[in-house]
Amino acid sequence: MRLKWGRILLGILVLAVGCGVLWMLAAGPVQQVMDAVSTDGSETARDTDTRGGGSDADLGRAAADRGDDEDAARDDDSNDTGGSARDGSTASEGAVDADGLPTFRVLTLAYTPYMATLAHMDAGDYMERRGYNLELFDVYSEAVDLDEQGQCEALRSGEYEALATTLDATRKCGEGVEMAIPIGQSAGNDAIVVQAGVETWSDIFEHAIAFTEGSVSEYMACFASHTAGVPIDFPVGFDDASEAVDAWLEGGERSVLSVVAWEPEISRALAARPDAQVILSSRDVRILWDVLNFSSARADEDPVAFLAFTEAYYEALRDLTRDPRAAMGRIRDWAEGDPSREDLLTVTANEDFVADLDLEAFATLKDAAILMSEGDTLRNRLEEAAFY
């Protein structure tokens, strides 16, 4: 199938001037880490590009040096400020673990591009080395069980420090939530799968299309509809991607010939119907962003904690992408015997883990610094989401 790139680009151009969105961009932590690495020796921050291998300008060393300097500065100032939140002495609003470390609580879910770096951060003690205890919570676990609005409220209230989610979900949070770290773009994890006879984007909308309501699947369906210039006359919404694929497999009276889903449901759909095809994939059109949001209230109360988290994130991402198999080994050890951690792992085999990582185009520190400083790319994506 040939993609109609002219229509795609025109659609993006039109959407980029859509209605405004209330949102906040927390460029500070990323830029501070970038500045620290850029000044840590003779090389520049280009060496933190996780796709390019190692060099003498080491992010971990820069972050550690920066942490040492900040610890010393806070020790010098402790008589005036009453102590640092990093040692728990003034962290009255935050939790403290059994070892006396302030906790940094992150909402995430069992999706490898979200979980991988965060779990690797915890497994490798990247936050502990900076004086914090990282705690990860599955938003859909029985213990947490938060929908998107609940996740936004939990972040606004300061109950949690950060949230891994999609950019289209971020726009729903509004004031009190800051988009802080761009994780990356879906690069094959999301797709529209069609049955035989559906050959063009216009054909999709002549029949019913199934998707998960209020998710990136609905966003992708809207993108295809708008770009093709054909309305979605027969939408069939579900609460879960597996339900949407089941309806597509059954067809039924509603004649569901297309389904928008994510992995592993895409693979299940294609395996069940050998004559089916992917007509639009996020590997071809990068429209879906994954991000980490910060709680504005908590970031204002303890900015040092959020800088530490940002440093730890990019150091862990660098090490993860340099040797994903070794990282997976550490993550398996970290999760073993702990049901809440095990539930965050969608795969445990090294090759499956590497394959899952390939479904996301991760944003490096250098990428993030550019995105967060110019702002237009992410802002346009938010406006597109509002337009749909």
Image (cartoon, helix red, strand yellow):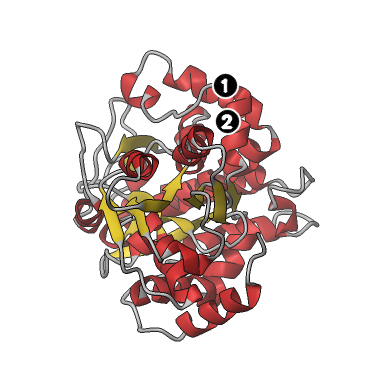
When asked about the image quadrant of residue 235, the answer is bottom left
When asked about the image quadrant of residue 341, the answer is top left
The answer, for residue 129, to whether it is visible in the render is: no
Q: Which residue is mark 2?
A: 353
x, y (%) of residue 140?
27, 38
When asked about the image quadrant of residue 133, the answer is top left
Neighbours of disc 2 within 10 Å: few (<14), some (14-19), many (20+): many
Task: Say above or below: 360 vs 372.
Answer: above
Task: Say above or below: 57 vs 273.
Answer: below
SS category of the residue bearing label 1: loop
Amino acid at circle 2: Phe
Amino acid at circle 1: Ala
Q: Is residue 39 left or right of residue 220?
A: right
The quadrant of the rendering that contains the N terminus is bottom right
Q: Which residue is mark 1?
A: 349
Relative depth, front residue between 95 and 245: 245
